[in-house]
Image: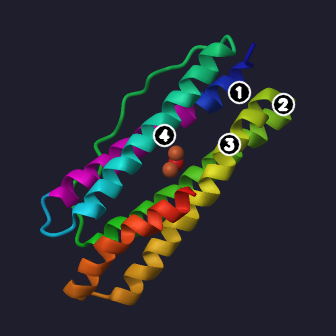
Amino acid sequence: MLKKVVQDALNAQVKIEAQSSQVYLAMAAWAEIQPGIDNITAFFYRHSDEEREHMLKLIHFINERGGFSVIPALEQPQLTFPSIKHAFQQLLEHEIMVSESINKCVEIALEEKDYATSNFLQWYVAEQIEEEALARTINDKLELIGDEKSGLYMFDRDILTVSMEAEK
Ligand code: FEO
């Protein structure tokens, strides 16, 4: 049976994962109407789907442990971005926030001697290392490209390889 303090922390994380999915969905919808960045668009849509999976995994865990998973209300995400670079900068900042929040959940689980939850959360700890690394790689590439249109065209091609390598 989950202790209330652990359940509350996990439910807060459900909201963060759900909100992440919305944030990236908004980036995807915005990217979709920009010319020539189909792979970047697909990347954001896929990332949004992954966040929904992260959320579902938490929901099932909470309920399977005898808790109650609260489906949260979400905030309106940012809808437009000054540039692709800005969107990816926000993605990185967002992932750093998610990592901090996961770490907080682990801390609470350990304080409560809830080793099953701590163990379950290790998957998220590892996932966050990968997501932050991927976001940093993308931001570094965009930094090199600057504002060149031709660079962005190549980046749109590269993002397929970058994200596939990250998933290996
Ligand atoms: Fe589920 Fe990208 O954090």
Residue 16 colored in magenta in the image: yes
Query: Which label's residue is closer to the chain start, 4 or 1?
Result: 1
Number of the front mark, 2 or 3: 3
On whether ligand 1 comes within 8 Å of the CB at mark 2, the answer is no
Mark 3: secondary structure? helix
Asked if the residues shown at circle 3 and circle 1 are in contact, with their CB atoms under 8 angstroms apart, the answer is: no
Number of the front mark, 3 or 1: 3
**Residue type, mark 2 in image:** Tyr
Relative image position of residue 52 (x, y in whole percent): 43, 36
| Corner quadrant of residue 109 | top right
- Residue span colored magenta: 12-32
Q: Residue at x 38, y 65 (%)?
A: 160
- What is the C-alpha distance between the residues marked 4 and 2? 22 Å
- What is the C-alpha distance between the residues marked 4 and 3? 14 Å
Q: Does the image show residue 15?
A: no
Residue ID for mark 2: 115
Q: Residue at x 54, y 62 (%)?
A: 166
Mark 1: secondary structure? helix
Residue that sits furthest to the right in the current view: 113
Residue ID for mark 3: 123
**Residue type, mark 1 in image:** Val
Relative image position of residue 134 (x, y in whole percent): 52, 65
**Residue type, mark 3 in image:** Trp
Seen in the picture, residue 23 relative to 84 is either above or below; the reply is: above
Which image quadrant: the C terminus?
A: bottom right
Residue ID for mark 4: 17
Seen in the picture, residue 150 relative to 79 is either above or below; the reply is: below
Task: Please rate how many residues cluster around mark 4, counting C-alpha atoms within 10 Å: few if below 14, some from 14 to 19, many from 20.
Answer: many
Q: Does the image show residue 150?
A: yes
Query: Which label's residue is closer to the chain start, 2 or 3?
Result: 2
Residue ID for mark 1: 6
